[in-house]
Image: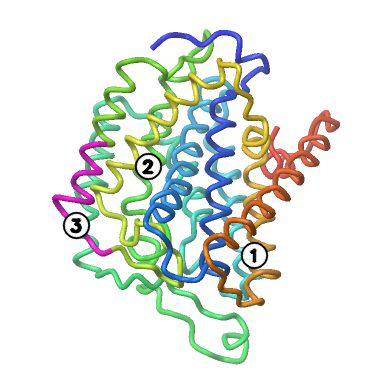
Amino acid sequence: MTPAQAWTVVPFRDMSVDLLRGLAIAIMVGANLIPFLLAPPAPFLLRVVASVAAPLFIFLSGMMVALSFRLKKHTFSYFLLRGGFVILLGALLDLLTRGMVPFLDFDVLYLIGISLPIAYLFLNLNLRKRVLVLLSIVAMTPFAQVFFGYSGLPLSVPVIPVLYGSVLPSVTDILRQWLIEGWFPIFPWLVIALIGAHAGTFRWQENGIRSFADRLMALLGGGALVIGGALFWYVLPGSPLTPHGYVELFYPPTLEFLLFITGLTFCLFSAADFLVTSRWHFWPLQVLGQCSLAIYSIHTIIIELCIQPLQLQVPLPLYLAGYFIFITLMIGIACMIRSIRLRLKHPPFIIRVLIGS
């Protein structure tokens, strides 16, 4: 892999990461609109595209641990604090926008929050132990899915009945959500974050950024993409569920899908490293990517409080028009956040985590 040159003009600002993170958020906005706006069934191609967002977001969150770990020299307490803030944000979104008891269904922010300190510990291991950890998670996943079962209905408990005395789920039920049956359970989604963390150790060196736009990375990523895709769609055809109307193809998250999405992620990285050195401009996605956590939170609030109560079910052309309006609004908000961030010389920790630094 060869070092990148002119596109690292901002210290520790990897423009390809911003581009891919913005792409993940842009796709996630559309995917999270589907249950509340699009009349079923969703076209298969739309389901495939929707399935890219969350894995890419998780991979990049793990990757950023490597940057902070190797170049910024942050300690375990930093990642514990940062992860705790992300989990708290997820809990507040559950509580205040959905009216649900937090810490139950294990949404993507819970997984990312837990993965940050774990990724730090993972990076302190040597290569052999890292491989052992990854293989252990991969090997345990199908057994855990069989042992615990997978219903495809993440646990959601409204707050109001609980306040009036309804019984909360048992600790065993909650643990099952965290481990295997929530939206993004630890088995197997943690492995995506850890692969991202490991990839970050190759990308960010003391002397700069290494480009993934080379033949070896394209071969490895493309091979995983083709083999994983073949296993998922042809050799081991499954019947992905659509819990609560969400149409991503990772319910349940099978190992062949994870192989496919890991290969696709590396292919996207290779493409992004090539594109940021070209004459093409992707500033809307890059701006989205620079404040991805804030945009994730804002779009969740708008969907849950403004769009979901309308109970709309529109055909695909109207859905696409609605998505275009929504993502344009999110890009506008991201530009405003970027303007504010550039004026803050020494923002507090919470502001840096939420709107980027």
Q: Quick one: label 1 or label 2, which is nearer the N terminus? A: 2
Question: x, y (%) of residue 62?
Answer: 46, 37
What is the number of the mark on residue 192?
2
Question: x, y (%) of residue 311?
Answer: 61, 77
- Kindly report which numbered mark, 1 or 2, lies closer to the viewer in this rendering: 1
Mark 1 residue type: Ile
Q: Which residues are magenta?
A: 226-239
Q: Is residue 90 above or below residue 14?
A: below
Mark 2 residue type: Ile
The quadrant of the image that shows the N terminus is top left
* CA–CA distance in space, label 3 to label 1: 32 Å
Residue shown at 49%/36% (left/top)? 60
Q: Is residue 130 above or below residue 184?
A: above
Confirm whether the magenta stretch covers residue 38. no
Residue shown at 32%/51% (left/top)? 188
Residue situated furthest right in the rendering = 343
Q: What is the secondary structure assignment of the residue under circle 3? A: loop
Confirm whether the magenta stretch covers residue 231. yes
The residue nearer to you, when weighing 57 against 325, is 325
Q: Quick one: label 3 or label 1, which is nearer the N terminus? A: 3
The residue that disc 1 covers is 303
Left or right of 338 in this view: 174: left
Q: What is the secondary structure assignment of the residue under circle 2? A: helix
The residue that disc 3 covers is 237
Left or right of 159 in this view: 212: left
Q: What is the secondary structure assignment of the residue under circle 1? A: helix
The quadrant of the image that shows the C terminus is top right
Please report contact status of discs 1 and 2: CB closer than 8 Å, yes or no. no
